Structure formats: structure tokens, C-alpha cells
Image (spheres, grey):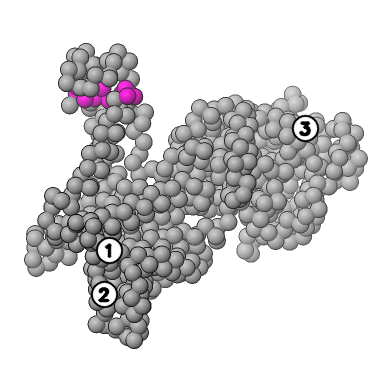
Amino acid sequence: MSEKPTTDDTEAGASTEAGRTPAEPDFLKVSDLHAGYGQARVLQGLDFTVARGEVCAVLGPNGAGKTTTLRALCGMVRGRGSVTLNGTELLGRSPEQAARLGVAHVPEGRGTFNDLTVEENLRIGAHLHTGHWRRGRAQRAAVAADLERIYGYFPKLRDRSRQAAGSLSGGEQQMLAIGRALMLRPSLLLLDEPSLGLAPLVTRELFEIVRAVNEEERTTVVVVEQNAQLALDVAHRAHVLEAGRLVLSGPAAQIREDGQVAEVYLGVSVRAGTGG
Amino acid sequence: MSMNVATLGTDRARRLRAALTALLAVAAVVGAPFYFAPFQVFQLTMVLLYAVALAGLNLLVGFGGQISLGHGAFFAAGAYTAAVMLDRYDTGHLATLPVAAAGCFLLGLGFGVPALRLRGLYLALVTLSFAVFLPPLLKRLEPVTGGSMGLTVDKLQPPAWSGLAEDQWMYFVVLAVATVALLLARNLLRSRVGRALLAVRDNESAAEVMGVRLSLHKTLAFAWSAMFAGVAGCVYTWVIGFVSPDSFSFVLSITLLAGLVVGGLASLYGPLLGAAFVMYVPSVAQDISEAAPGVVFGLLIIAVMFVAPTGLAGLAGRVRGVITPLLTRTKPSAAVRTPESEPPSAPPAPAETAPADAEPVGAPPRTEKE
């Protein structure tokens, strides 16, 4: 247990081991976050930070509070404590206000608008960037450029742009959900279980795209995932939750290699992945 | 029939066919008042008028995913606005339209507030209470509304230059109003606001995390919807020339909702079909059974919903879905025979299959081009 990286000593470890010093280590700062549903208290005081431009994985068993963490960040669930994004308090805001501050949430189960076409879905992602009377033309051009950018990441969506979202496969719907969130031009992208119900190959493709988005646009990403191995491949840092508490934090590589710790908290999948 | 199908696939033929259909439709719509007897023209006018109200209700129920059992109240508000303006202030007919529209828009905005907290059956109940409570209120406000006697006002009169009879002139005026209203509804749905509305209907929380302000768009849906109902009510006063509380009982609200569901929710043509159903079927029911027309009307609604669960507007798509496979199976033989009587535009060689464009009729509008 003693070699387990704790929250404290990884602050130093992250900057050296990840090979780059994060410019703004406190871009997203979660302190003493409590949240729950009615009587059920799910999160019991979380503390962690995500640096700007980082991909951060939140891992843990079922019911650990991973999804609740994301929901608290985007305002879907009311939380206590403090969550600041670039210094602005996020708690106490509605999801719509959080979206205005640049938080784009891809909900569990995708939440695509199934009766709308793929392109209409994407345009709803641009909802906040349109509708100002005076800058109509510039806005339309910007949204068109955004659409191109998304189609660049997800060429399959371009092929199906006029098709109803409900007719897409699960993987394509997940791509659409992520693309829609990117239309928001987010500074913080929250991904809730992108692998849910998808074939391993599709999931891998999705994570590669997430990596590409992160590298090209320096979008900060917080991803909640059951498939720890895959998430750790893409993430720079990882936090492991259990029963609403943070039990482990550190650079993703370190967590991936620490076979014993991984086995305790994440199941055997990681160990198998590292060949141990 | 099979030869028709062989030429369907080609683009030019399809465009030609669409243009021809549109031309025929316009000719039929414009020619109708000269062909039919005055009473029939009046009935057509009423169909158009109800179509406006149903198009409004469609925005709320079909595209907004909310429910209102109180739209008769907005209809009545529009009708009384026009009647009171004509009766007391002797304004022209045209002046009543913007006032009724704006008034009902604001009214809808106010009544949309409960929709923020309630949904489904609870919202239905609250909206039903508007409809139940309005007629007695109109009776009480006798100095303004004429009480239970109602108000009689001038009908719309044709100007001398038109050379039209009263019923014909009314038909054209209502046709113009309905055309503008239906186009407005269509464009609204293809706009940013419409997309937000559809998103809220499909998945409220997903829409919200995309930055769509739920409260704003839900109340706006009520407001737009009420505005359409108010415009229909206003035009009703122009056409009928008489309003009384009993014309706007809560049965009207329920009839409007039934008409919309029968016509086809979330379909652009549904309101027109529903309006025709609401207008003609009760009189058909009367013919079938003098004693209990209500029973026949009810049974007919059940029959329609059984045959066409997505409404009359969806029926065409369903029929096409059944027939197209049958036709495509007979197609190879049809393509070999060169079409003689068809438009010369169709090269028979690349007769690709048509069903690519067989979108579901009830589906919301496709993407706009910007």
C-alpha cells in the first residue's frame, strides 16, 4: 500500500512524468464536492484538479459516483462544495448556464435527438453560437466551419448528415453526441461512458478521436469510463473513485503500470492489458 | 401504373411531377370558390380557419411535446378580441388581426408558465381549466362581451372592385391568412428556435446541456401556439359575424386536440387533414345517425386511429410502405417495356430505385440550407 500514489505526491509526479508542465494546473478545480439524489448521498467530498489541455479519466466500479461527478460538474445534479472552471464557480448553475461557460457534457447513453437529422443535431450544439441579430452572417460562417471541423473528425457523420439520428448505429450515435458537444466549442468536455454498449473496435476508434481532438484543440477532457484500460491509454491523469471517495490519483501511466493497485480497484482488465 | 413507377426514379421526371402537382393544387384551391356552392365554400373556409388553429396546436403538442386541453380558450380570446374591437370601437376588420395575434401571444406566454413545472396529465388538467373557466367569465363580463347573448358584428364584406360574392371573398382572405400562418409555422420549425423546440421534445436534459434554455423555449412554444389559435379565432369572427360563450365551450378545445391527433401530430400537413376531419366528419356522422351523431363521430375517430395510428398524414406513408415493395417487385418487367405515354424526359436505362426519398411523412422538417 505504501507505494500507492496518493493525491499529494502525484502533484509533483504529474508534471515530470507526463513530460510537460501544465500551464494552468487548476483549470478545473474540484474541492470538497458533495452531491447526491434526494436522500442518497453519492459523492462524499471529492478533491481533484484538472490542468488545461489535459485528458483526465475518472475510473471506478459501478456506483462509485463517476457519473454523478460529471453531472455535478455540468449542473445536472446539485452539489455542495466548490467546482471552479478557470476561476469561475460552476456549482449552483443550471446546465444551460454551464454550457454558456464552455462545459459540454456528453451524457450517458448519448442523448441524441433521434427524430432530427445528424446535421440538425450538430446545429443544436451550435445553439449558443447563433441567434444574435447583428452578427448573423459571421455566425453562420463560423457554424459552417465548425460543421466541417466535426465532419473532419467523424467522416461517417458527413455521409449520414441528412439521416435521422435514430437510424444511426450505436457507435455513430456516440460520435454524433461527441460531435454535437464539440459544436459548442467547449473548454471542458465531459464524456460519460462513451464505450457503453459499443463494440471494442468502435470504442477504440472513438478514443482515438478524443485523443485527436484533445491534441489539436487543446480541449480539456474529463472522461468517465468502465473500460479502464482504454481510458488510461488516452488519459494523462486518472482518478479512481470508490463509494463516493477518491481512493487513488495519479498520472495515467503510473496507474496503468501499478498492477496491484489496478487489480484492487479496477479489476483484472488493466493487468491483462499490461501483460502482467 | 407500373409504367409510372419506371419513370419515377429519374430526377427530371420527379421535378416535373412535383411542379405539375403544385400547379394543379394551386388551380384547385383558387378555383374552388367558383365551382362550389356558397355553403360548400363556407365549409372550405372553416377548414382553412381550423387548420390555422391546429397548426398552432401542432407547434405545442406535435413539435413541442407538451399538451394543451385549453386551446379553445385562446381561440375564444382571439374571437372576442376581434368582436369587441368591431363592436365597441368600430375598427376595421384588418386592425383586429394583429391585436388578436399579439394579445394571444402574450396570453400564451403567461399560461405557458405552468408548463414549466407540470407535464403530461397534470399540464392537461391545468390547461383544461382555462377552457372550462373562460365561458362563464365571458358571461359575467356582460358590459364588454355582451354576456350570454354574445355579440353580433359585421362580417367581412367584399370590396366592390373584387366582383366577388361574400363567401368567395371570405374564402380568399382566410386562404391568405392560412397560407401565411402555415408557412410561418413551417419556417419557425426550420429555424434555430424550432430546432431547440424539437430538441427539448426529444431529450430535455440533453438539450439543456447544449445550452438550450428550457424555460424560454417551453413558454415560447405556448405563446406561438396561442397566437395561431388567436388568429384563427379572430378570423372566425370575421367569417361568422357572431360570438357567444357557448360557441367556445371546452368541447372546442377537445375537438381541436382530437382533430390534430387524427390529422397527424408533428406533421406539416396534419393540421389541414385534421381540420377537414373536424369540419366534415360531424356532419357525416349526422347523416349516418340522426339520433347519436356523437357516437358515430367517436367511432370514426377510433377507426382512423386504428388504421392510421400516426394520423391521416402518416397514412400516405404507411400505404406507400406497403405498396412500394409490391411495385418494385414487378419493376424489372416494367422497365423493359419502354414507356410511350410518359413525359419524354425519362431515359429508361439508369432507373434507380426510388425509395431513398421515402422519408416518413410524419417526420419533422429536414435541414435548412443556409
Q: Which residue is drawn at 28% across and 54% down?
A: B175
Q: Which of marks 1 and 2 is nearer the N terminus?
A: 2
- Chain letter of mark 3 equals A
A154 relative to A22 in the view: left or right: left
Q: Is residue B11 magenta?
A: yes
Query: Label 1 sits on what residue type?
Result: Thr
- The tag on residue A256 is 3
- The tag on residue B277 is none
Magenta segment: B2-12
Looking at this view, is A194 or A84 the one in front?
A84
Query: Label 3 sits on what residue type?
Result: Arg
Report the mark closest to the observer, 3 or 1: 1
Question: Picture quarter containing residue A148?
Answer: top right
Q: In this view, does A259 lie above or below B128?
A: above
Q: Is residue A77 visible?
A: no
Q: Mark 1 points at which residue?
A: B255
Q: Residue at x 40, y 48 (%)?
A: B186
Q: Is residue B237 above or below residue B56?
A: below
Q: Percent position (x, y) of residue B33?
A: 18, 52
Secondary structure of residue under mark 1: helix
Q: Residue at x 36, y 52 (%)?
A: B180
**What predominant SS class does the magenta segment belong to?**
helix
